[in-house]
Amino acid sequence: MDVVRRYAGLATKVRLWANVTEKVLTCLLDRDQIDQALGELLENAIHHTPAHGEIRVTAAPVALPAGMRVRITVQDTGPGVPNEDKERIFEPFFSKRPGGSGLGLAIVRQIVENHRGTIRETGGANQGARFEIELPAHTKQEMSP
């Protein structure tokens, strides 16, 4: 996860770490776009996580009825997303961040959906934000010509 290394320099007051399961499957994706989406999530997490807090990024395979997926999670120990805002956070121009444009999470959602994936916020109130991205996974046989 190169994007996590790039953002580590910005996370000077919080602990930022990544854990990628060895058995993560392959995803067909535009790496620059996925890095942009993860970067936006990391930037938000850094902004909202108090000093000495923690941001965790994980990636692991998950079996769902729709097939194998790769789940990427960005979780922080900030204040989290209020329940009344969860339905709106991915809408364009919705922001409660001073000076925020409200476009960041809308762009993240669009990037993820363009990759046939899903994103949702699953953190609990006052327990930090937790964004889960699920992308379709492919086996080596599926990727062979």
Image (cartoon, rainbow, N blue to C red):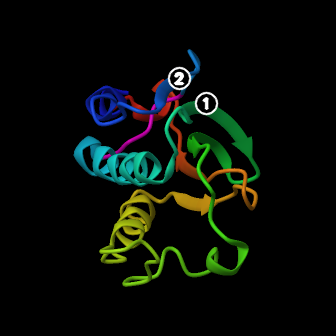
Give the residues in magenta: 25-29
Q: Quadrant of the N terminus?
A: top left
Count of numbered marks:
2
Q: Residue at x 63, y 32 (%)?
A: 61
Question: Can you give x and y, in whole percent of width and height, for residue 73 in the image?
Answer: 57, 42
Look at the numbered disc 2 and give the secondary structure of its residue: strand
Q: Amino acid at mark 2?
A: Val
State yes or no: residue 27 in magenta.
Answer: yes
Could you tell whether 77 is left or right of 32 in the image?
right
Going by the picture, which residue comes out furthest to the left?
Answer: 32
What's the magenta bit mostly, secondary-structure-wise? loop
Q: Which residue is mark 2?
A: 20
Could you tell whether 116 is left or right of 34 in the image?
right
Q: Which residue is mark 1?
A: 60
Which comes before the other along the chain, label 2 or label 1? 2
Please tell me how crowded label 2 is: few (under 14), some (14-19), or many (20+) other residues with Cα within 10 Å.
Answer: few
Q: Residue at x 41, y 56 (%)?
A: 115
